[in-house]
Image (cartoon, rainbow, N blue to C red):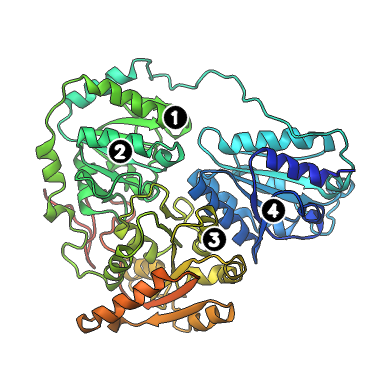
């Protein structure tokens, strides 16, 4: 006779799930006992945080819902950082946690934690299952909320006794979406296409800002078609990288705190800003009161709560970008428009667009340029969090819309390695490169064991500067070089650790960038990229190299620091 655990797995199969990540324990043991023959592959992480980040990486690349399992108490609480990360970045995620027996809930039983309460503020929807017969409907509804609108995380907490109980006569359910009228902001109108066309026709300096919403809506092709037609300066948030063809003449690169000069200046000067699926958080806007000071804003967004958070928008366009972008493109097809070629030429001018215009090019950026140039077109770059993350984002030129993954909103160190596992399993035929730092790699370094067991041919690059680099950069610029607790000069032998996990590794010193070593370095990089198995490469970066440009906290986007000096407005 089937048990509740078998019912859970049947419900997951009903939702199309065939791969999950997790770590077993007492309260979720019945679910693991039922895995054999379920049609679901389970990937064993070495820490629950590794499991949830891997589930995120899988979801970000595949567009499907990522699924993670964990037991009660510490198993569930170890998921919290990944759940928060999925909430911030709009990642569809379902976490199924075991709970102590129903009769013990509230008694401080062994490994009992109020998982519902702990994660309530971090989820789109969550539920503690109290009756066996509710399992099918709860799982169906959980997947609906994870996928719908702006995607996000869901937590389903199931007591162990319900997973052990007989479940005869119960079958998977289908959740019917609530039939509610589409929410609109009070000042939105039904003739929005005409209003946006009119704004474009009167604009002298229009620009487009592309965010993660374009990818989540599977609308990259539609956005590319619109921007190729409009030929206005365009740029991306860190999560929007890859949504615009990097070879497009109108593309100015990444915008924000470590964005290109061209993108930041164009956004500061624009008189019409088209925001396409971006939240406009502080890392993109700089000081909110000075954000796009001369612009009217048209904000395309599926989640009405994201509108008017920084500045009121002239026209809010609430809906799925896969539908609203083609509607605007169609309306523009027959409408006369200004010639913005002079504005585009000014915005994209080499003197404005050079990413290292007055400072020396950091060796890490040149190294990443050389490495990225060797990656196949459909490659996926996954980063951890820190200086290497921003260097990689600045240098990324891939055209795969889901080819750049990072923890953006939460900025969670330890994301890179496990997320790369999920990415590789979502796209087994693609080259997956994990770019990490010597700090971030050590937060989930145990997932090297997962890589080895899964046979995932991930390429792992560690940019090693023997510091918590981004914190050290801020300490150097704003805290009088008081490098308090950021020194990592006692780092371990990363190549030796990789070897212990059955993964080959090698090290490149700074001399690899010398002209006389160019061919030897290129050969090493080719072997690294083309290897059919997992490989680790450590690149020793100058200890005090900084990421430029940089918009300091509280500054406007045109007040970029270009080297170690006070921010100053750039005259253009």
Mark in the foreground, 4 or 2: 2
Would you name the residue on which mark 1 appears? 320
Numbered tag placed on residue 304 in the rendering: none
Badge 4: how crowded within 10 Å, few (<14), some, or many (20+)?
Answer: many
Numbered tag placed on residue 69 in the rendering: 4
**x and y percent of residue 494 in the render?**
49, 80
Mark in the foreground, 4 or 3: 3
Q: Relative to the observer, which residue lies in front, 528 or 369?
A: 528
Q: Is residue 131 visible?
A: no
Q: How many marks?
A: 4
**x and y percent of residue 163 in the render?**
83, 47
Res 320 quadrant in image: top left
Label 4 and label 2: CA atoms lie apart by 37 Å
| First reached walking from the N terminus: tag 1 or tag 4 | 4
Numbered tag placed on residue 421 in the rendering: 3
Q: Is residue 263 left or right of residue 112?
A: left
**x and y percent of residue 394 in the render?**
30, 58
Q: Is residue 155 left or right of residue 435?
A: right
Q: Relative to the observer, which residue lies in front, 503 or 126?
A: 503
Vertical order, 165 against 24 (above or below)? above
| First reached walking from the N terminus: tag 3 or tag 2 | 2
Label 1 and label 2: CA atoms lie apart by 16 Å
Badge 3: how crowded within 10 Å, few (<14), some, or many (20+)?
Answer: many
Q: Secondary structure at mark 3?
A: helix
Q: Is residue 407 visible?
A: yes
**x and y percent of residue 217 in the render?**
45, 36
Label 3 and label 2: CA atoms lie apart by 29 Å
| First reached walking from the N terminus: tag 1 or tag 3 | 1
Label 1 and label 3: CA atoms lie apart by 30 Å
Numbered tag placed on residue 224 in the rendering: 2
- What residue is rendered at 18% in x and 53% in y? 353
């Amino acid at each position: 006779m089937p048990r509740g655990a078998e019912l859970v797995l049947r419900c997951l199969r009903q939702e199309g799930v065939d791969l999950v990540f997790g770590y077993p324990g007492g309260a979720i043991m019945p679910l693991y006992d039922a895995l054999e023959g379920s049609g679901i592959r389970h990937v064993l992480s070495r820490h629950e945080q590794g499991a949830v980040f891997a589930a995120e990486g899988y979801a970000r690349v595949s567009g499907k819902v990522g699924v993670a399992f964990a037991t009660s108490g510490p198993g569930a609480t170890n998921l919290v950082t990944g759940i928060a990360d999925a909430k911030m970045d709009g990642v569809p995620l379902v976490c199924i946690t075991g709970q102590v027996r129903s009769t013990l809930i509230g008694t401080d039983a062994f490994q009992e934690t109020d998982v519902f309460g702990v994660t309530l503020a971090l989820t789109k929807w969550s539920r503690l299952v109290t009756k066996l017969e509710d399992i099918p409907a709860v799982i169906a509804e959980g997947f609906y909320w994870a996928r719908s609108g702006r995607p996000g995380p869901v937590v389903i907490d199931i007591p162990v006794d319900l997973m052990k109980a007989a479940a005869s006569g119960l079958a998977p359910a289908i959740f019917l979406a609530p039939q509610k009228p589409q929410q609109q902001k009070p000042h939105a109108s039904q003739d929005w296409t005409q209003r946006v066309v009119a704004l474009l026709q009167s604009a002298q300096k229009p620009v487009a800002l592309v965010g993660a919403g374009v990818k989540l809506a599977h609308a990259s092709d539609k956005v590319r078609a619109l921007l190729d037609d409009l030929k206005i300066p365009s740029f991306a948030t860190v999560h929007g990288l890859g949504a615009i063809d990097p070879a497009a003449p109108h593309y100015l690169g990444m915008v924000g705190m470590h964005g290109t000069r061209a993108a930041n200046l164009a956004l500061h000067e624009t008189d019409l800003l088209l925001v396409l699926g971006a939240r406009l958080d502080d890392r993109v806007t700089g000081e909110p009161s000075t954000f796009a000071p001369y612009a009217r804003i048209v904000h395309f967004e599926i989640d009405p709560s994201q509108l008017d958070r920084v500045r009121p928008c002239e026209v809010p366009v609430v809906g799925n970008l896969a539908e609203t972008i083609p509607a605007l493109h169609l309306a523009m097809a027959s409408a006369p428009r200004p010639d913005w070629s002079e504005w585009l030429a000014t915005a994209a001018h080499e003197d404005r667009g050079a990413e290292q215009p007055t400072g020396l090019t950091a060796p890490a950026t040149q190294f990443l340029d050389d490495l990225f140039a060797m990656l196949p077109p459909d490659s996926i770059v996954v980063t951890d969090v820190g200086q290497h993350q921003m260097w990689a984002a600045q240098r990324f030129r891939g055209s795969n819309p889901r080819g750049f993954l990072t923890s953006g909103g939460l900025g969670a160190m330890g994301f890179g390695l496990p997320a790369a596992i999920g990415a590789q399993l979502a796209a087994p035929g693609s080259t997956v490169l994990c770019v990490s730092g010597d700090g971030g790699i050590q937060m989930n370094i145990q997932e090297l064991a997962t890589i080895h067991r899964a046979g995932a041919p991930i390429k792992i690059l560690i940019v090693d500067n023997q510091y918590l680099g981004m914190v050290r950069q801020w300490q150097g610029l704003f805290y009088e070089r008081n490098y308090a607790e950021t020194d990592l000069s006692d780092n371990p032998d990363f190549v030796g650790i990789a070897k212990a996990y059955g993964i080959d590794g090698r090290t490149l010193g700074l001399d690899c960038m010398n002209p006389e070593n160019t061919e030897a370095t290129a050969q090493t990089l080719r072997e690294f990229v083309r290897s059919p198995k997992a490989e680790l490469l450590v690149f020793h970066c100058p200890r005090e190299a900084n990421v430029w440009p940089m918009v300091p906290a509280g500054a406007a986007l045109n007040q970029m620091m270009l080297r170690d000096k006070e921010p100053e407005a750039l005259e253009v």
